[in-house]
Amino acid sequence: MRFIASFLSNKEGSIKKDITFLILLFGIAFFQCLGRMPLFEPDEGRYAEISREMLERGDFITPFLNYVKYFEKPPLLYWLNALSFTLFGQNEFAARFPGALMGLLTVLLTYHIGRKLFRRPAGLLAALILGTSTGFLLQARLDITDMILTCTLSAALAFFFLAAREGEPRKTLYYHLFYLCAALAILAKGMIGIVFPAAIIFFYLLIFKRWRILGEMRPLTGIPLFLLVAAPWFIVVSLRNPEFARFFFIHEHIERFLTKIHGHYKPFWYFIPVLAGTMLPWSFFIPAAMKGVWKERLSSEGESRLYLALWALLIFLFFSKSDSKLIPYILPIFPPLALLMGSAFASMADTIAKPMKTSGYIIAVILTLLGLGGICYPFIATHPNLSAAPCIVIGGIFLCEGVITFINAFLGSLHNLLVGMVLCSYIVGIASPALVLSEIAEKKSLKEMGMIVRERVGGKAVVSSFGLLQGFSFYAERRVVIVGFRGETEFGSNQGDQSGWFIDMPRFIRLWDSPTKVFTLLSKGEFASFHGLVQNTPQVVAQTSKYLLITNH
C-alpha cells in the first residue's frame, strides 16, 4: 500500500515508466479474453457483418448489411474491423480489437492531458479512474462505434486546449492534431465529431473572452487537413449513392435527435442513473470534483477545470435533450470527468476532504449493497440469468470493495482509499468478462446456429430468419432471407429489387411448404405459433435457450 501510494504521489515520475505501467496494466484488462465470448446481439453482430461484407465485396465505400445498403454510420469502425480481420482472421477477437485499442489509447491520452494540465499525480490518477470505471472498461471490449468516437473526440478536444494554453511550445502540432482528430471523429460517428468541439470551444472562448485564439488556430493549414481526411468518403459515397445524403444527414442526424423515430426514447433524466452505474465506483465523487469549478475559474488550474466541466456538461445535456438515447452515448464524458476527479484527489494531502469523505461513505454503502445483492441473486431470483459462481465471485469483490472504502473513508486515508478502489475495480474488470459476460453472451449468441449453416448447409438451400438477426449472417457467412420485420435493413431493402430477400409471412409459408430445402432461425415463442401454420413439419436442427434453427425437409 505504501509503495503504491508513494508511486501515485510522486510529482516527477518518468513518463516512459508511467506509460509502460499503464500499457501493461490496462493492456491485460482490455485485451484478455476478447475472443472468448461470441458476439453480442445486435450491435456487435451488425458491425462485424458489415466489415465482413466489405472484405468479401472489396468495396470500402458503400457499407452493406445482409447485402443491402446501410448508411446509418460512417465507415471508420468498418475500416478498422476489416483491417483487423485481415490481420487476425474473421473472429471475435479481431472484431473487438479496434475498440479495445481505442479504449487503451483513451486511457493513455487522459494521462497525457492530466500530466500536462495538473502534473503527474493528477494524470496518473485520472488514467486509473478512467480505466477502472466499470462501464468504460466493459464497453471498450465491445465492437461498437462509441469507443472510437470517444477516443477521437477526446483527442480533438484535448489537443485544442493544450494548443490554446499560453506559452505552449507545440501549438502548431497540437492544433493540427485537433483538426485531424475532429475529422476522424466525424468518420467515426457523423457530424457530432465537429458539432461538439465547435460548441465546447465557443462557450470556452465566450467565458474567457479569448476570441483571438480563433486567429491562431492555424486555419490555413488545419482546415485543408480536416477536409482532406473527413470529406473524401462523403463525396465518393454520395456520388455512388444519390440517396445517401438525405438519409444520413436528415434521417440519421436531425430526425434521430428531434424525434422518436429510432425507438430509443428515454426521459430527460435517463443518463443520470446510467452515468452513476457505468462510472462505478467513481461516479459518486463527481459532484465533489466539480465543486468550485466556476468560482475558481481564474485560478492557475481553474481555467483547465472549467474547460473539462464544459466538455462533460455540454455533451451530457445534448444527449439528455435528444429523443434517442442509448447507454454508450455518454462515453465521451468519461475522460473529462476522470480528469476532474484526478485533479481533485491530487490536490489533497493524504487526508480526505469532507466532500470526498461523504462521497466515500455513499459509494461504500452502494458497493456493499451491490455485493450482497450479487451474492444473493442466484438464490432468490425466480429465473436467474446467471449461475451462482460468477454472482458470488463478483458480488464478493464488490462487498470487499465496499468494506475497504468505508474503512478508509472513516480513517480519512486518501491514498489507501484510492488504492483499494483501484485494485478492487480492476479485479472486477478482469473477472467480469470471463465470469459474467461470457455466460450472458453464450445464452444469447447466434454463433452455434450460424456455424451449423456455414458448415452443413449447401448453397442451394434457402437460409432465413424471422426478423433481422445480425450476428447470424456473420457466422453463417452468407446472405439470409428476412421474414417480416426488417429492422435496420429497412432503408436498404427499398433500394433496388430486394423482393426475393425480404418476404412476408404468407409468402414464407408457401416457400416452407414447397420442395425447396429451407432453414430458418426463430425464437421459441415464434416457433409455437409458426408450427401450426405449415404443412411440412418443422424439424429442429439446433437450439439455444432462446432460439431454434429448424428445417422443412
Image (spheres, rainbow, N blue to C red):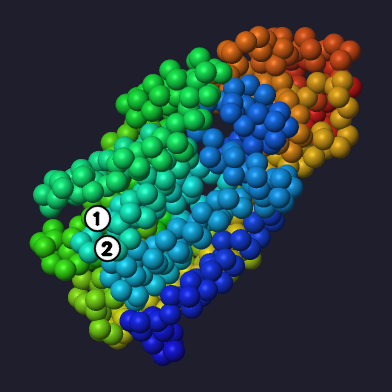
Can residue 238 be seen here?
Answer: yes
Residue 164: mark in rendering: 1
Q: Is residue 11 left or right of residue 134?
A: left
Dot 1: few (<14), some (14–19), or many (≥20) neighbours within 10 Å? some
> Which residue is outermost to the bottom?
2
Residue 184 locus on image (x, y percent): 45, 42
Q: Quadrant of residue 168?
A: bottom left
Residue 400 locus on image (x, y percent): 47, 76
Q: Amino acid at mark 1?
A: Ala
Name the residue: 81% across, 21% down: 462
Residue 276 locus on image (x, y percent): 35, 56
Which part of the image, by quadrant, shows the N terminus? bottom left
Name the residue: 49% across, 30% down: 232
Asked whether disc 2 touches disc 1, contact meaning CB atoms under 8 Å apart, the reply is: yes
Can residue 5 be seen here?
Answer: no
Residue 287 locus on image (x, y percent): 24, 61
Whether 143 is drawn above or below 468: the answer is below
- Looking at the picture, tell me which residue is in the foreground, 458 or 61: 61
Location of mark 2 (residue): 168
